[in-house]
Image (cartoon, rainbow, N blue to C red):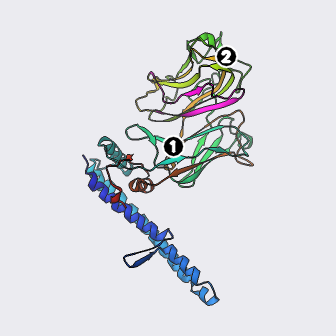
Amino acid sequence: MPDYTSIFEVLGQYARAFTQLENLAERNLSFSGSGETFRSLDKLREDFVDVLNDTPAERDSLDAVSILSDAARVARGWGSQLGQSLSAWITNALAGELDALGAGQSDVLRELQRAMLADAACVAANAVALGTLSADAANVGNAACYVSKQVADAGENVVDDERITNQRIAIECTRDNAHHRVPVGQEEFRIRPEVGSNVATRVIPVTFGDITDARNVITDGAFDAETGGSFDYWEVIAGGGVLSRDTGTTLFGDGALKITGDGATAGNLQQDLAERDPPLESGRHWALGAWVYVGAYSAGDVTIDLLVDGVASALTLTIDGATATGQWLHLGGFEYLPRSSFPNKVKARIRCSADFDGEVYIDGVSFAPAAEVPHAGIHVAIFQGATAPQAAPITDRYLVDSTSDDAGAFQTFARDRLGIALPSSGSPTISDTLAE
């Protein structure tokens, strides 16, 4: 077992050193202790401005502010040099402790995460949250946007991503059909966090008939293709009498799936994704979504989910008595496909319970990889709507706030300086006092 005490004693010293340099160069601080008063460089600049601004002669002395600004830039440079020292320690001393000599920094850090999980070692957790995603009131399109704060850790446990920080994240359309001739359903978006680089993504398109899409692995999610009363790309497993193609109430193309429950028949419609090319990528988060319309409802439910190696997915999109009637609504969410979920083990499934009594229409079923923004700790998915988004003259956009209480000293250090989240707990085995 690695010597976690020794490892985190060193990491703690680096954390303290980075905090000291940040306090000196970046923050406006003044506090007293042991008979002395500490003032950060920013605080000293503020004090100079406060007292040397009354007369021209005094203002001539404000070059002291420039000198202190230069000192702050030098301190930031020390931070960069300290980062190089930390990287060297990771790829040498830490790598040796983890039997990972010769590996790059990111690989060594992943090995640390795996070792900590295996040995039940953990640091204090940061509590993270996402606010309510809001669509701008000026949006032209009605694409359905979703954001998730979940991630799979080194042991493939789905947990909150503690790389989340306090910031506002904008998701903005950058290229559209009307202004840039981008195909409808392929509009381009930019995920723009306040901290870190932007990430580009695209709308997840609805598929029609024989036309497939490289990202959306569902074929004919619009239920356009039917031969002799049977869907061309969907297999009726049970309850064929309650499943049909409707051409009257549709959102995309010429058809939609109609489920007419009689209160006694369970329906089961599936699409096997084994033959998709390229094959489904396992070990990552995917987004599942569909547009639904409830024409009538009395009892039971309709569900959309996945079968992963014969087991129902954790994500289930449910249509029941709580679903609004008489309008098209989008349901969506995220599902992690573990590394063991080979492409020939995944099926999309639409069911109605035996007691379902009502009339439901489903259109635009889609399943695609979610966009990853690791430095912001989120996944994003944007599903095609009936009205396309626009990038100009006013950009269609969505906003969401992410928050962290930064309660864990080691976890905050790992996020800010290493770009990772360590295994964490409310009852940590590694004390934050080593880093405070």
Report if residue 405 is visible in the image. yes
Query: Disc 2 vs disc 1: Cβ atoms closer than 8 Å?
Result: no
- Judged left or right of residue 3, residue 307 is right
Against 279, residue 431 (above or below) is: below
Q: CA distance from mark 2 to mark 1?
A: 36 Å
Is 327 a magenta residue? yes
As rendered, which of 118 and 85 lies closer to the eye?
118
Mark 2 = which residue?
245
As rendered, which of 39 and 347 lies closer to the eye?
39
At 59% across and 42% down in the image, what residue appears?
A: 201
At 55% across and 49% down in the image, what residue appears?
A: 402
Q: Which amino acid, mark 1?
A: Lys
Mark 1 = which residue?
149
Instruction: Indicate the position of residue 45 as horizontal and vertical percent values.
Output: 53, 77
Give the structural element (helix, strand or loop) at label 1. loop
Disc number placed over residue 260 in the picture, else none:
none
Instruction: Indicate the position of residue 312 as horizontal and vertical percent values.
Output: 47, 24
Instruction: Indicate the position of residue 397 as horizontal and vertical percent values.
Output: 66, 46
Q: Which amino acid, mark 2?
A: Arg
Q: Which residues are magenta?
A: 310-336
Against 92, residue 120 (above or below) is: above
- Judged left or right of residue 30, residue 201 is right
Residue 34 found in image quarter: bottom left
Is 198 a magenta residue? no
